[in-house]
Image (spheres, grey):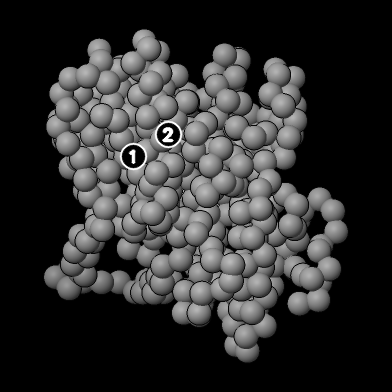
């Protein structure tokens, strides 16, 4: 279910002065202007509206690399290019795994762990704190080119959710959620720890300040989120008295003998209801891998789910479209109210495309 009210909030916030402390989290898809209300009246065939022109892409890159190992990473659409050093380190970590004979999956996981451990990114240690000021819920997924898929959703008290997804891969299931996922991960040896960081706390404080200001603005269309409170525990006192969302990190990898894998990890958004799940753990939405390559997405989760975006891009790879062109075409055609970023590798090279700046890295 799409949380359309977030669009109004994000648009209002985009017009105001930047708050302190500076929020360097990835600019979410729903920070764009809200879509105009649709006219549902009949449209004669000869006056049907023309398709919107393709969007300009500030990030569009890639290269032909027909042989050898490859790793490509992203830190979330809207992540500052000045933070690309972390994405580059993540790609290098994945490259080291491949150089030592590791699998594409091992490489993609190693890259994701580096991204999860970087508090600048909305995953693992840097994951967004939710409305109640305490809850941190994480999603992660992985897929290999032989069709194996595993994911966790709304998992808590796990620093590296991609490791939990890897444990699910060896279980009888493909997706575990909530407290069941948390207990499963702890049972199989992952530490019980809350991945909270000073950076995430600063982002939370800034978001709550902006949210309160928007709600208190006369004539605002932003809903009073206190009405819909569904978190365990009492509402924080400052909310009783009285956004920016986050995004996803990802990696795709190719071995020298053309085996592929993809990983994703996210802390979700702050301004959302308890238990919201985006595209990351949904099969075919956030990521996809097969014999033709691997794809990982970032952006507005609800729209990515509706488009089955990663699988759609993979089908283009399988039909012979080069990775660089496949991701660019998908990003340019993405529903204009929302932002998106994609990375991909195929048998002949790699590609990165995004509708906003997006920190990314690649090896070689």
Give the residue drawn at x 25%, y 15%. 256
Structural crowding at the residue carrying mark 2, measured as other residues with C-alpha within 10 Å and reported as few (<14), some (14–19) or many (≥20): many
Residue 344 x, y percent position in the rendering? 29, 35
Q: 308 or 205: which is nearer to us?
A: 205
**Horizontal relation, residue 159 to residue 354: left or right:** right
Residue at (41% x, 35% y) in the render: 89
Q: Position of residue 203 (x, y in %)?
A: 61, 60
- Of 241 and 61, nearer the camera is 61
When the figure is inspected, residue 179 is found, relative to residue 226, above or below; the finding is above
Foreground pick, 77 / 120: 120
Residue wearing tag 1:
361
Quadrant of the image containing the C terminus: top left
Lateral position of residue 8 relative to residue 346, left or right: right
Q: Position of residue 276 (x, y in %)?
A: 62, 49
Is residue 23 found left or right of 85 in the rendered image? right
Residue at the outermost top position: 101
User: Can you see residue 106?
Assistant: yes
Quadrant position of residue 143: top left
Q: Do residues under tags 1 and 2 come within 8 Å of each other at their CB atoms?
A: yes
Mark 2 falls on what kind of element? Answer: helix
Residue named by callout 2: 90
């Amino acid at each position: 279910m799409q949380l359309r009210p977030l669009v109004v909030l994000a648009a209002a916030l985009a017009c105001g002065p930047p708050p302190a402390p500076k929020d360097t989290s990835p600019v979410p898809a729903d920070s764009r202007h809200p879509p105009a209300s649709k006219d549902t009246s009949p449209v004669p065939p000869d006056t049907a509206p023309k398709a919107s022109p393709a969007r300009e892409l500030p990030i569009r890159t890639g290269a032909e690399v027909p042989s050898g190992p490859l790793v490509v990473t992203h830190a979330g659409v809207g992540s500052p290019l000045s933070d690309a050093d972390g994405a580059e380190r993540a790609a290098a970590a994945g490259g080291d795994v491949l150089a030592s004979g590791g699998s594409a999956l091992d490489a993609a996981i190693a890259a994701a762990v580096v991204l999860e451990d970087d508090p600048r990114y909305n995953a693992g240690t840097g994951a967004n704190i939710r409305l109640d000021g305490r809850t941190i819920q994480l999603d992660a997924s992985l897929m290999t080119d032989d069709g194996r898929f595993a994911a966790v959703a709304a998992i808590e008290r796990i620093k590296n959710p991609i490791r939990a997804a890897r444990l699910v891969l060896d279980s009888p299931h493909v997706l575990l959620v909530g407290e069941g996922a948390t207990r499963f991960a702890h049972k199989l040896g992952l530490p019980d720890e809350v991945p909270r960081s000073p950076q995430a706390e600063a982002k939370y404080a800034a978001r709550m300040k902006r949210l309160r200001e928007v709600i208190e603005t006369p004539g605002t269309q932003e809903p009073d989120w206190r009405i819909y409170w569904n978190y365990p525990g009492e509402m924080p006192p400052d909310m009783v008295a009285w956004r920016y969302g986050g995004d996803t990190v990802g990696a795709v990898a190719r071995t020298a003998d053309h085996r592929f894998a993809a990983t994703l990890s996210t802390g979700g958004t702050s301004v959302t209801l308890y238990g919201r799940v985006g595209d990351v753990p949904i099969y075919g939405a956030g990521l996809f891998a097969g014999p033709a390559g691997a794809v990982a997405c970032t952006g507005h989760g609800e729209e990515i789910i509706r488009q089955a975006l990663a699988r759609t891009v993979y089908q283009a790879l399988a039909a012979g479209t080069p990775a660089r062109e496949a991701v660019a075409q998908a990003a340019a055609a993405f529903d204009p109210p929302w932002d998106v970023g994609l990375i991909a590798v195929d048998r002949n090279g790699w590609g990165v495309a995004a509708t906003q700046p997006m920190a990314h890295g690649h090896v070689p």
